[in-house]
Amino acid sequence: MSKLFLLVGMMLILTAGCPPADEEVEGDEAGECSDGVDNDQDGSTDCADAGCAAATDCTGDDDDSTGDDDDSTGDDDDATGDDDDSTGDDDDSGDDDDSGDDDDAQQVELSGAVEKGPFILGTTVAVSPVDGSGNPTGDVFNTSTTNNLGEFEIAFAASGYVILEAAGYYYNEVSGALSTGPLTLRAVHDVTAGGTQAAYLNLITHLAYARIVELVAIGISFTDAITQAESEVREALGVGPAGYDPGVLGTELNILGGDTDPNAYLFAISSVVTQAAAIAAGPQGPVDATLQELVNTISADLATDGLLDAALAQDLLDAQAQVDPEDVMDKLAQRLGDLGSNADVPDLNRFIDTDQDSVANSFDNCRWESNATQDDIDGDGAGTACDCDDSDSGVGDIALDADCDGSVTASDCDDGDPIVFPGAPEGCDGLDTDCDGTIPADEVDGDSDGSPACAGDCDDTESSIYPGAPEGCDGLDTDCDGTTPADEIDVDGDTVAPCAGDCDETDDTVFSGAAEGCDFIDTDCDGVIPPAELDTDVDGLAPCQSDCDDTDPTVLPAAPEVCDGLDNDCNNLVDDACADPTAGAIVITEIMISPAAVSDAQGEYVELYNPGLFAINLVDWQFTDEDTDFHEIVGDLFVPAGGYVVLCRVADSTQNGGIPCDYGYANEIILDGGTDELVVDHPVTGEIAVVEYSGSFPNPVGASISLNPLQLTETANDAGSNWCSATSGYGSGDLGTPGLPNDPC
């Protein structure tokens, strides 16, 4: 039968739904799929009928123990032309007309377990079918473990090989606790036979996984790739006798499957690799993350050539020497008992070789000392390497005093350890050295930080405190050196220590995050004193203390107010203590009536002079000619003591012939060429300055008229004889000294 026809038949089954109860269905009775009769009268017989698509007569599985077709000829004896050739394939030409795949998905009922120690309930398990080249088909079937023994079940349809992947938390048989992080394990499994199967994910399957993928990629069959990869893993890890072969695939190994050699071997591999991860992580390190990193590193290293890096291999040998088989077995037995399991724990000592002499502990007459030749001169069962008197079978005899500590086995609570015997001095090893039935409290590592009190742990209730621990910022002697670091001590009682940001441990108002005051110090310890707290002008007060101008030491609260155009006493009033100016406080000293370089409308200006000792602000003062011209000065315009301001018709020096103008009055004041007057009025005291120029005054073109610099008074400027034409040039070529002392007359 063609695969396409079978596929169509299967699709019809899926889409047609269930037939009525009284309707005949091809294949619903034994033998109907091979009797050559159209039992349901639908025009199709036997395997060509959709009802027989999943029947064993049509899938090639005859459900018997012989693996044949239940006839003596080896063929199907049907009329479809299938399998009637010598190859067992699905067509008459001897092949499948495809790449060798069956394309016939088998129904698989897969059960098993995920084991490092056992994974916990809820661990995710994914099944991903792959083609003959190891490429995913795109299907993924998901399930999860159903108990804390790591067991799972899943049903799916597939053929060939599948990749199994599990991720979850697990029981760590070395530490005797559940993991604090998840672990991911993978396996490759053959589901070609379909039906009910079992597969176990474990460290053997995971360590071989990458190598299997690599071998399949270069054309090696899955069967051969798995065999080769797992053999290379066993050789590389160095656990158990050289060349050991469990005789089963990694997916058949089960730590909870009984005390068999294959299962004990898997248990030994799991314990050694976990011990190596614990050593690499250190007492406070992340064992679970380190374990994942280690197994992935081993797998990746083996992938390329099946060989393990020498340093990594040595790490595993060192770890094997540190595994305590009895302790590990006891912990797993306790875990299984807590879970209500009666599974036998495999004996690690059949594969763990503590002394690295190539003789596993169970067969080693001296498991603590390397003795590959297993010499035992007196034949008392205690190897020469361990026998304190190998010439006397009564001394050092395992049955009498195996550890040669002078205490006979019957009374020695650990006759495998010569430092343990009744009356022995207690050490600091976590053992009941004197066999009194009690481990001294100071030898018990109460906080599991790797250091008991006898080893210097000054607080065995806190796992972050132990000898050599890194100091934190907690006010504690974390490293147990007898001293709390000075920067962890809050001397001033403000609850913040120097290590937490207190920059002044003598002042409880100064610490990290404190509110800034007005005290000239870095109160919040951010490394910066706020500008408002700095007395820049060194007058004794900072801006935060109401110094309104910290660039001038004469300006500060309570300073005397002087008439200088400044708020000297910081009361937000300028010259508020000054008397209003009177006549002569301002003098008109220079007038440009007829410029030549620019027009009158552009170049006219008037210069004012302050003969007093304090600046005068002209804000709101009026500038008039006693006729119709009038301008009120808007905004502050200070005339400094002994200085000048220039009022211009056009303020822009690029447009007014180069006059350095202080204020522009536009066309509100227009100077007549022959006779005119200029008046400066204070808004309260009235007329301050006036000039009435006429025929007795100079009247040049292109030059200003200037008051004699020796006569700069309000009365002197009334006489035309005190005025002369300017001789100094400015700007675009006109003559005058705007803003500067006048030329001599």
Image (tube, rainbow, N blue to C red):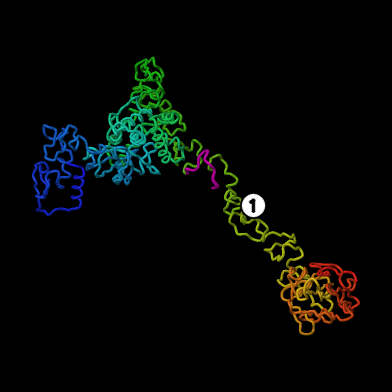
x and y percentages locating residue 470 in the rendered image: 53, 41
Q: Where's the C terminus, which quadrant?
A: bottom right
Circle 1: element type: loop
- Whether 640 is drawn above or below 95: the answer is below
Residue 434 can be seen in this image = no
Q: Which residues are magenta?
A: 462-476
- The residue at which mark 1 appears reads as 506
* Quadrant assignment, res 6: top left
- Amino acid at the residue labelled 1: Thr
Q: Where's the N terminus, which quadrant?
A: top left
Q: Is residue 540 left or right of residue 743?
A: left
- Whether 730 is drawn above or below 309: the answer is below
Considering every residue shown, the one lying at the far bottom of the view is 627
Given residues 154 and 48, the one toward you in this image is: 48
Secondary structure, magenta segment, majority class? loop
Magenta stretch encompasses residue 463: yes
